[in-house]
Image: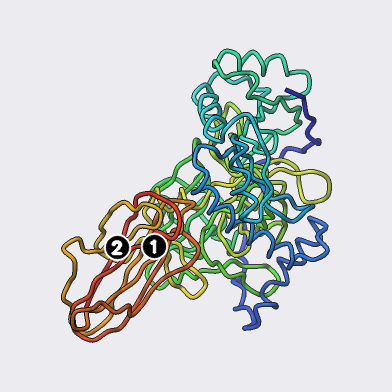
Amino acid sequence: MSRLRMPPLVALAVMTTFGGALAAAPPASGDPSVAEQPVLAAMRRDLGVADPVARLAAERDAARADRGLRAALGSRLGGSWFDAERGKLVVAVTDSRAAAAVRARGAEPRLVARGESTLVAAKSRLDAAAPAAPAAVPGWRTDPATNSVLVKHAPGAEARARAWVAATGVDAGTVTFVESLERPRPLIDVVGGNRYWTSKYGCSVGFSVQGGFITAGHCGKVGETTTQPGGRFEGSSFPTNDMAFVRTNAGETPIGAVNDYNGGRVAVKGSEEAPVGSSICRSGGTTGWHCGTIRSRNATVDYGPEIGKVYEAIETTACAEPGDSGGSAISDGQAQGVTSGGSGDCKGGAATTYFQPVPEILRSYSVTLLTTDGTPNPPGCGTAATGTLSSGGTVVEPKAGYFDAAAGAHKACLKGPAGTDFDLYLQRQSGTTWRTVASGTGPSSTEQVTYNGTAGRYRWQVRSYSGTGQYTLETSMP
């Protein structure tokens, strides 16, 4: 396929911060527009967006359409991305008959030769051969816009890159070779929300979760302790992944927000994945707020023979510098990733930064993201039950048909597959009929419901507004 040229990128060195910690920012004003100002200003500065409010609204619509179309198209999906110039979602399809469904959701169809699953399979095959990859290949990623897997190589090293790909057995027609001056390094000293300290490094809180916070794995190993806030690494993985969970000490108060380094906090609303092409902003103690766009949600980055590779990372054009590792990456209030590493700097010119996706960290350590009011997103609500829904279908939980409860608080957390829209209803029996007393009907695959009720007979209903797959429902009752 055609050869593309990547802009020059300056390598980042691993650095360590010593000295006092940065103070936590005070709460943001109650006016949401005030809280959003740092994000909007950074988007204007870094992306040249004249109207960032309109841009975020368009990206929100695109993300909603993307979830629905992924569920509807299945194997006919070739990938999707947000086209910033036209302010709309572009959806690649392998079947021209699927174009009507794409247009019906307000997106633009693009007919391609390969399905997304084919690209993912090709990249997975390259990942399996990663130990044999030449040092001149700093990474590779899926790219829906070119309907290919982009393999990066140093100038003059295309032949070595091609030989490696050929040895893996991956179809050369699936690969685009990209010249790049990248020399990625982990970004050790990182501030996402607030700085914390280990015995060796100053790193940063990525996002608050129940019981602590998530951050980059290269910031500390299991058992290592932290200060300001105090805690202990209970889980850590690096390389392959770059993620960690720190359980904080009693008295620390995790809050579902990110320090904007402009005197306020940016609310964390959830962890829905933004499409490729969407804007993404990151917060770090070295460089503050900076924004870029998402290039890929499935990139492999090689940090060199002394360290190793990280797979399935988010690749972006946002800049970062040493001191920014572990920090938060957020898109329209949705937690996207924690800072891993990258190339370039924030002083001008091109940059590339990689992030470990948040959903994978939450799943790996069975922790729950905190939103801005301190409310956890599911899971984490009690006894779990699982089942399967078809699109438009309804299932009753418990499977016995009902449960008897005393007066008090009911709570439930529902989680379905990515790309689906599952809803949750709590119903109370009244005579011979069931009456809905509480519900969660948002546009995503996760819902949370709380309800204070009188004693009686109750049941939960799980419904699929769109999409098919397995759900997990966690419940507690008075």
Q: Residues within 10 Å of mark 1 (few under 14, many from 20)?
A: many
Residue ID at (28%, 80%) = 409
**Colour setup of the view:** rainbow
Image quadrant assignment for residue 142? top right
* The one of 113 and 151 positioned closer to us in this rendering: 113
Mark 2 — residue? 474
The quarter of the picture where residue 164 lies is top right
Pointers 2 and 1 in contact (C-beta within 8 Å): yes
Label 2 and label 1: CA atoms lie apart by 8 Å
Q: Is residue 150 visible?
A: yes
Q: Secondary structure at mark 1?
A: loop
Name the kind of residue labelled 2 in the image: Glu
**Residue located at (62% from left, 69% from top):** 266
Residue ID for mark 1: 378
Q: Position of residue 232 (x, y in %)?
A: 41, 56
Question: Which of the 4 image quarters holds residue 116?
Answer: top right
Q: Quadrant of the N terminus?
A: top right
In the depicted structure, whether residue 34 falls above or below residue 454: above
Residue 56 sits above or below residue 299 on the image? below
Q: What secondary structure is marked by label 2?
A: strand
Q: Label 1 sits on what residue type? A: Pro
